[in-house]
Image: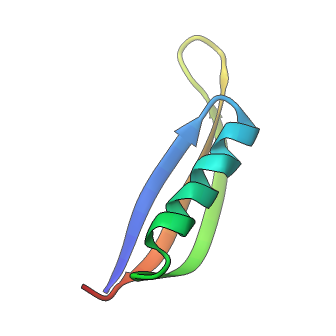
Amino acid sequence: MLQTDIISSTDYKELQSSINDFIAKYNCVWEVKQILYSTACNKDGDIVYSAAVVFNDFE
């Protein structure tokens, strides 16, 4: 079954690091299918980078 985990940060490099950590931690159990990126502004006007990591949940 496909699952999605959302990772967000106001720092793009931190977002990339979090995605890499997520994949390194779970890739042996879950097969990552796609990563979808988006940007938005929060109520304070800061840019927020988000990624939806789509994966197969084999458990």
User: Which colour style is shown?
Assistant: rainbow
How far across and how far down the image is residue 25, in percent?
A: 47, 65
How far across and how far down the image is residue 23, in percent?
A: 55, 67
**Quadrant of the drawing holding the C terminus:** bottom left
From this view, report whether residue 45 is shown above or below residue 56. Answer: above
From this view, report whether residue 35 is shown above or below residue 48. Answer: below
From this view, report whether residue 43 is shown above or below residue 54. Answer: above
Q: Nearer the viewer, residue 18 or 44?
A: 18
Q: Is residue 23 left or right of residue 55?
A: right
Residue furthest to the left:
59
**Quadrant of the drawing holding the N terminus:** bottom left
Q: Tell me the residue at 44%/71% (across/down).
A: 26
Where residue 41 sits, quadrant-wise, is top right
How far across and how far down the image is residue 48, in percent?
A: 63, 32
Q: Tell me the residue at 53%/79% (across/down).
A: 32
Q: Tell me the residue at 39%/82% (across/down).
A: 29
Q: Nearer the viewer, residue 39 or 28?
A: 28
Q: Is residue 35 left or right of residue 32?
A: right
Where residue 2 sits, quadrant-wise, is bottom left
Q: How many numbered badges does the structure rendering display?
A: 0
Q: Nearer the viewer, residue 7 or 36?
A: 7
Where residue 55 sits, quadrant-wise, is bottom left
How far across and how far down the image is residue 8, in percent?
A: 54, 41
